[in-house]
Every structure is written in C-alpha cells, then in structure tokens.
Amino acid sequence: MSRMALLLSLACCAWAADGDKPRCTSAINGKLWPESANTDRIAFRDAMRSGDLEICAAYGWKHHWDRLTISVSKPAVEVKREASPTTELSAASAPNSAQ
C-alpha cells in the first residue's frame, strides 16, 4: 500500500513540476509553448530570446515538446571526435607544400 501511495505522490509531483504545459498530442501538433507565443509576437520574441520556446512535434507515432531555440547564456556541450584512420592516412600522404 505504501508503494502505491509513493508512486501516486511522485506522479503528482512530476505533473505539477511541468506547470500548465499541456501534454503534447496530435490535437496540438505544431502549437508553441508558452501558449501566448502562438498569438502574441512580443511573447514569441521574449520566449525565443530566453530559450524557453518549445513546439509540439510528431516523430513517427509519438509526440513530444522540442526546444526551438538555444540560449547563448547556457553552456554548450563540447563534442570530441577521434580522428578516423582514413583521415590520418590522407593527412600523412598529402604532399608537403613547403618543399
């Protein structure tokens, strides 16, 4: 019984943390969040500048909220790429222009 109460309280907390954002479904596919950004240009601009603008998008049969903008104040994740063997070989076999 206590597990059921715990699961119920966690579900309520997760729902409350999302605020008033509706669930992304086919009925609102293509709509923006915050809702005011759908009709008000100033609200759209403010949400875009703050990085909070999201759109309800469909991927296959599933719908979810996607961010449309990236805030410059948020740190970027650096991706490290390893050199492929073909890149190393082509760089080594390239003629040296300094000769």
Image (cartoon, rainbow, N blue to C red):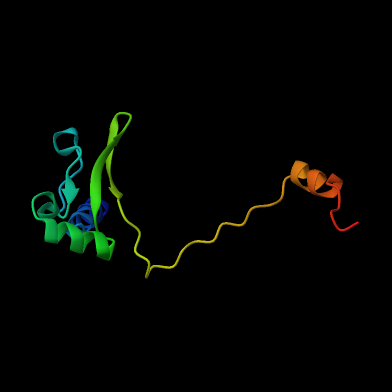
Residue 20 appearing in the image:
no
Give the percent coordinates (x, y) of residue 84: 72, 45
The residue under the point 18% across, 48% down is 32
Q: Identify the image quadrant of residue 12.
A: bottom left
Res. 4 in view: yes
> Which residue is located at x 76 percent, y 41 percent?
86
Q: Position of residue 97 (x, y in %)?
A: 84, 54
Residue 96 x, y percent position in the rendering: 86, 53
Nearest the eye: 15 or 63? 63
Which quadrant of the view contains residue 36? bottom left
The residue at the point 79 percent across, 44 percent down is 90
Q: Is residue 74 above or below residue 38?
A: below
Q: How many marks?
A: 0
Q: Is residue 18 left or right of residue 36?
A: right
Quick one: 18 or 40, which is closer to the camera? 40
- Residue at 24%, 59% (x, y): give it: 48
Most extreme residue toward the right, as rendered? Answer: 99
What residue occupies the far top of the structure in this picture? 61
| Picture layout, residue 73 above or below residue 99 | below
Q: Nearer the viewer, residue 9 or 77?
A: 77
Quadrant for the C terminus in the image? bottom right
Using the rendered view, name the quadrant where residue 74 is placed: bottom left
